[in-house]
Image (cartoon, rainbow, N blue to C red):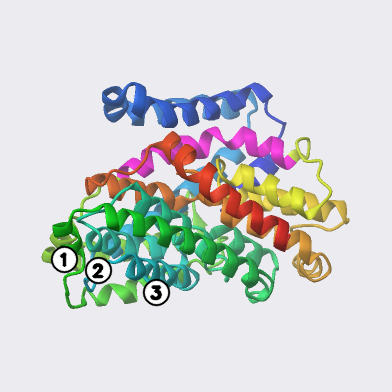
Amino acid sequence: MSSLFLAAAHSTALPSAWMVIPFVVLLASIALLPLLAADFWHHHYPKVAVGLGLITASYYAFGLKDLTSLAHVTQEYVSFMALVGSLFVISGGIAIRVKGEATPVVNTVFLAIGAILSNLVGTTGASMLLIRPWIKMNKYRITGLHIVFFIFIVSNCGGCLTPIGDPPLFLGFLRGVPFWWTLQHCWPAWAACVGLLLAVFLVLDIVNFRRAPKDVREMETAHEDWTFRGVANLGLLAIVLGSVFIDPKYAWGPFTLTSVIMIAAGAISYFTSDRSVHEANDFNFGPVKEVGWLFIGIFLTMLPALAHLQSGDAISLKTPLQYYFATGALSAFLDNAPTYLAFLASEMGSHHMDVSNVTDVARFAAEHDHALIAISLGAVFFGAGSYIGNGPNFMVKAIADKAKVHAPGFLGYIALYSLPILLPILAIIGWIFV
């Protein structure tokens, strides 16, 4: 999502620090209003998100007279929604009925497969493809535990081995990081992180399984056959994934050639997929609409925060471990892709290298691999810290909500899972591998 980074970089003047307030208010609204004023939030969250976004947009347009940043962020938002929306629609045309026996062991294996698949089709692609089967195979005893660990493993930490896996790594690849660099340097931390998360999940799911009534346990272990419908959509999925490698210079206003291809692939899937497959998936556009409204506010309001981050005023770090936790802390609440680029630019600058120079980036990856490992792991792993840390997180939450699954709210996610479970594991990973 390099346009957000470029938007901050091209700003004609550093925005006032006060302009970070709309972003803070939006985060607070997402966290608190579903608890304190659920009915109001349900009916008016688009107005809140867009209204706060317009405050920032107006400041940039009329205060800073910086239309370049707004043009970049608009293009980035369109690209983001084209990716998320197309994968959502295409995956909705694929019906996977998984084998029964949703025991804790089977569930753990399923998540492990999802972690590997994330590196082949991206965390967004794997999440959209697997979340519905995941919900269905655990339908008799599914809880917030299953949704959150799916986000931890499939939507985030799993995609750390290839540039395809997660947007920050893809941006690094586009800037000059060798394609196989992440696999060569990050696989030990990936294996440890995913392994620890799977081990914790297995223990918690065993407890969950044993607490379920006997008739529920019998239904969860009933034997079913695997079925797969909508095979033609796999070709469209490949087209979407392949299109991300197209040079973004091919663009018409806010639409890049990549986003046009993605939108076209999604439209073809929607109109050609068998309606019975959509019905089997309970397909509707509710989740993608919710993500669309909220993220237009997030993309706009976080522009000032990213501008200050890029300016270097907020960065005074020396060790890889500091970069790991600093990148991670911001990646949990800002988009992890521009955060990755901002810290990469800062660290490269301290070595008199330019993040826009492909040769410099490749040399930095070779000569300062510990710093790049720290930034890469921090961006990818900590993207699981909240629902807005990475694109697929909120989409998975929205799909779970539509399926009537009790997923934790914004604060519940952080208080019950991120802080007591994810953070200690990521701290261990940092101390050992960074």
Identify the secondary structure beneath mark 2: loop
The part of the chain drawn in magenta is: 289-310
The residue at the point 57 percent across, 56 percent down is 381
Q: Quadrant of residue 286?
A: top left
Label placed on residue 285: none
In-image side of 193 versus 242 (left or right): right
The disc, 1 or 3, on the residue closer to the chain's N-terminal end is 3
At 84% from the left and 48% from the top, the residue drawn is 318
From the top left corner, tell me how far across and down residue 1 is, in percent: 56, 53
For badge 2, the amino acid type reads Ile
- Residue 308 within the segment the image draws in magenta: yes
Mark 2 vs 1, N-terminal side: 2
Is 242 inside the magenta-drawn segment? no
**Residue 267 appears in the figure:** no
| Residue 428 located left or right of residue 220 | right
Q: Is residue 231 left or right of residue 416?
A: left
Please tell me how crowded label 3 is: few (under 14), some (14-19), or many (20+) other residues with Cα within 10 Å. Answer: few
Establish if 348 lies above or below 220.
Answer: above
The Cα atoms of the two marked residues, 1 and 3, are separated by 20 Å
Q: Are marks 2 and 1 in contact (CB under 8 Å)?
A: yes
- What amino acid does circle 1 point to? Val
Residue 191, image quadrant: bottom right
For discs 1 and 3, the disc positioned in front in the rendered view: 1
Element class at badge 3:
helix
What residue is pinned by disc 3?
A: 238
